[in-house]
């Protein structure tokens, strides 16, 4: 009888936009008491637009955006799409880049017109160079993600990008709270941006500026403290955490790496489906306890 019940429920899951890749993980979803969400691309759409260009020294705004776009053209990160769109909107001719490399959770770099151009997170930029005085704090408080553009070791500017919070995120978090489930937001992005998003959607526990391995560490720590933990994410940077969570859930619109690592894919990219997984697992497996 067990396989039949499971087959029926995975059928229902598929109808509801849940792709269940690992049935035992789906069964464990019944017992979840903690759901961890990635921020960018998971609770937000990961659809960035450039809102501000800061210039340090003598490069123009166009030059900062042009060089950043040359590097970002080779990246899959949601920030990259935002930088490229903005450069294209301004009619900027984007030069070629070679030797592209992504450092997950930190940024990207490549050679452009003979110089090494790096586009880095605030934490990564600070460890690489001395940043000039400027108003990054107020940008972060408006929920904007800031990346720094370096030519060689010299910061030539910064880009502020605004993302869009998914309209379903607040309801998803509220419903989880109503079910007595703890919610944690985990992000590689800056603390101010993370706190701004968290306040908008009602998440009370935020862990920001974490690298991919540290996301995994957080999951392991929660598990070690006796919690049954789900991870929900979209990015390459979420894969280790998706793999070690009791239940790994990938956002359908996210990267292939996340979908292939997860136990369940939320096909419609709706964070409320993380709640539906728990409800469906509870109703499917209650008879068998
Ligand atoms: P999240 O955990 O919220 O999904 P990530 O770990 O993917 O965020 O990224 C963390 C930070 O690393 C970003 O906020 C950004 O500062 C930097 N970063 C990652 N990829 C890129 C990129 N392609 N261009 C610029 N910055 C990047
Ligand atoms: Mg993400």
Image (cartoon, rainbow, N blue to C red):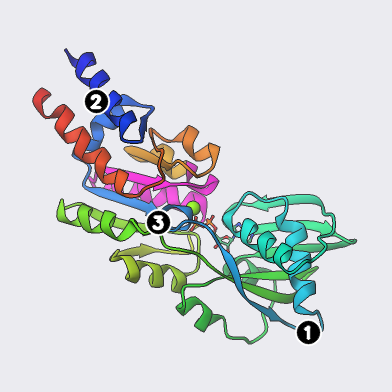
Q: Any mark on residue 20, and which? A: none
Q: Position of residue 269 (x, y in %)?
A: 41, 45
Which residue position is annotated with label 2? Answer: 9
Could one spot residue 194 in this view of the protein?
yes
Q: Is residue 235 magenta?
A: yes
User: Element type at marker 1?
Assistant: loop
> Residues under labels 3 and 1: Cα distance?
36 Å
Which residue position is annotated with label 1? Answer: 57
Q: Are marks 3 and 1 in contact (CB under 8 Å)?
A: no
Q: Which residue shows up at 41% across the image and 50% down it?
A: 217
Image quarter of residue 201: bottom left
**Over which residues does the magenta segment extend?**
211-239
Q: Which residue shows up at 67% across the image and 84% down it?
A: 132
Q: Position of residue 106 (x, y in %)?
A: 60, 59
User: Element type at marker 3?
Assistant: helix
User: Height in image: 90 above or below 225?
Assistant: below
> Residues under labels 3 and 2: Cα distance?
26 Å
Q: Furthest-right residue in view?
A: 114
Q: Which residue shows up at 51% across the image and 56% down it?
A: 211
First reached walking from the N terminus: tag 3 or tag 2: 2
Which residue position is annotated with label 3? Answer: 43
Q: Is residue 171 left or right of residue 113?
A: left
First reached walking from the N terminus: tag 3 or tag 1: 3
Single out the mark in the foreground, 2 or 1.
Answer: 2
């Amino acid at each position: 009888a067990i396989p039949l019940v499971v087959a029926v429920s995975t059928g229902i899951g598929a109808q509801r936009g849940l792709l269940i890749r690992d049935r035992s993980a789906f069964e464990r979803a019944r017992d979840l008491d903690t759901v961890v969400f990635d921020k960018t691309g998971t609770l937000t759409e990961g659809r960035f637009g450039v809102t501000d260009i800061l210039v340090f020294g003598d490069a123009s705004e166009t030059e900062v955006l042009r060089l950043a776009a040359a590097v970002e053209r080779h990246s899959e990160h949601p920030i990259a799409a935002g930088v490229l769109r903005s450069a294209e909107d301004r009619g900027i001719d984007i030069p070629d880049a070679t030797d592209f490399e992504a450092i997950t959770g930190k940024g990207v770099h490549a050679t452009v017109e003979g110089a090494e151009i790096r586009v880095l997170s605030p934490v990564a930029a600070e460890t690489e160079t001395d940043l000039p005085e400027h108003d990054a704090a107020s940008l972060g408080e408006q929920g904007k993600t800031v990346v720094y553009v370096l030519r060689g070791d010299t910061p030539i500017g910064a880009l502020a990008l605004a993302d869009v919070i998914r309209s379903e995120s607040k309801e998803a978090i509220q419903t989880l709270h109503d079910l007595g489930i703890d919610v944690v937001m985990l992000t590689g992005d800056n603390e101010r941006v993370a706190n701004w998003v968290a306040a908008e959607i009602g998440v009370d526990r935020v862990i920001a500026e974490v690298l991919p391995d540290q996301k995994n560490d957080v999951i392991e720590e929660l598990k070690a403290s006796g919690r049954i933990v789900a991870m929900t994410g979209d990015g390459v940077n979420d894969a280790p955490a998706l793999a070690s969570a009791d239940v790994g859930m990938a956002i359908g619109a996210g990267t292939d790496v996340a979908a292939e690592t997860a136990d369940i894919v939320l096909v419609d990219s709706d964070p409320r489906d993380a709640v539906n997984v728990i409800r469906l697992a509870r109703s499917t497996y209650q008879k068998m306890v």
